[in-house]
Image: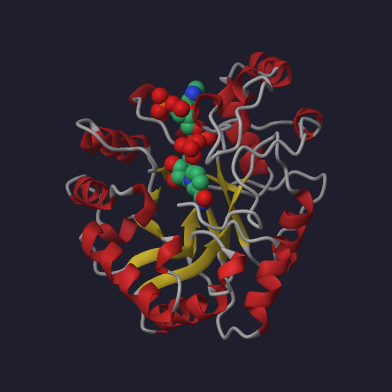
Amino acid sequence: MFATVGDESHPVSKSVVLANGVVMPHIGFGCAMVDGDDQEAVVHAALEAGFRLFDNASLYANEEGIGRALRSGGVPRNELFVSSKLRNKEQGYDLALKGFADSLERLGLDYLDLYLIHWPMPRRGLFCETWRALERLYDEGAVRAIGVSNFEAHHLEELMKGCTVRPMVNQLEFNPYLTIKPLREYCAREGIQVEAWFPLGGPAGEGLGPKPKTDRIPLLENSTILDVAAACGRTPAQVVLRWELQSGVIPLPKSARPERIRENFNVFDFELGAEEMRRIDLLDCDGRMGPSPDECHDMF
Ligand code: NDP
């Protein structure tokens, strides 16, 4: 029933169906660092471009403004797919219930479409207990789908050992420099949809957390990406996002610029061939820009 991760290209439509039957957009708008005076204009530009999935998190400290912009954006609530994440310091059963309620209040909504545990924080040993709170929220109808972010296969195995609701989504750092194929294969086998953070390689070559900057060529300037883009008559960002869609992943690109926001959504009317997909697959260099999930303990 679920897509496998092989060398083949996945058929692309504008939405995917999660394991519990919930329909989710195949591309989303990343809300991290979408703040400041133009926040509302940026969110409205994303709505106008066609984005319906908005990826937020308590950590981004902008849920209030994003929620306000979504509510004034003219798109009915049932056409939006609003997602947020539990902050690491709010793990634990009671804190997680409160963390969810606080996010909902800040967003000004009465339910979420998707709620994720932001990082496993394995040394704290709380993610299974935290998951029970998400299961309760799901059972009560406060959220339509629940999942995790930055979970490796062994975290997922531990979580699923005692769960009554399986995670439907895993949001991971993913792009042509970091293709995490074994983990995506595991998620596909388990019916867990993968979403991509840093889908365009992240903000201007910056990493996340204390990791030093890399001297790797920025993804959108990579010669293979530029070649394929020239051959398709598309931009480098569109080629990368299309490769992610055809890889069966939901990309969450962020931009604060209306013309780029439109460009990033405009990826459903062309297709990469098998050879183009293969050339981009070969760019994998385990090029992680964020912390590894097993090493992220005290951050965020
Ligand atoms: P992205 O890979 O989306 O890159 C964003 C950067 O690319 C910005 O500097 C943006 O600049 C630039 N950009 C956007 N579109 C284009 C384009 N068409 N051409 C050239 N440059 C472009 O990284 P993000 O850090 O924003 O990650 C995306 C989302 O993933 C976040 O917003 C967040 O929702 C999620 N995330 C989740 C994490 C997790 O742990 N679960 C961790 C990090 C992110 P400009 O704005 O000027 O256009």
Q: Residue visible at 73% across and 48% down? A: 180
Measured as percent of width and height from the top left, residue 194 is found at 61, 55
For the residue pair 162 and 42, the one nearer the viewer reads as 162
**12 versus 163 height, above or below:** above
The vertical placement of 202 against 162, above or below, is above
Q: Residue at x 59, y 70 (%)?
A: 19
Q: Quadrant of residue 119?
A: bottom right
Q: How is the image coloured?
A: secondary structure
What x and y, as percent, mark residue 199? 57, 38
Q: Is residue 189 left or right of residue 248?
A: right
Asked whether, in this view, residue 202 is left or right of residue 138, the answer is: right
Whether residue 275 is visible, yes or no, is yes
Is residue 252 shown to the viewer in this render?
Answer: no
Rendering coords of residue 75 (x, y %): 25, 49
Q: Quadrant of residue 263?
A: top left
In the picture shown, does residue 45 fall above or below 117?
Answer: above
Residue that appears at 77% across and 34% down: 285
Q: Based on the displayed image, in which of its 4 quarters is residue 221 positioned?
A: top right
Left or right: residue 107 versus residue 286 is left
Query: Which residue shows up at 63% across the image and 65% down it?
Result: 192
Q: In the rendered image of this protein, does residue 100 appear above or below residue 28?
A: below
Q: Position of residue 2 (x, y in %)?
A: 70, 64
Residues 112 and 136: in front is 136
Q: How many marks?
A: 0
Q: Quadrant of the N terminus?
A: bottom right
Between 78 and 64, the one lying in front of the other is 64
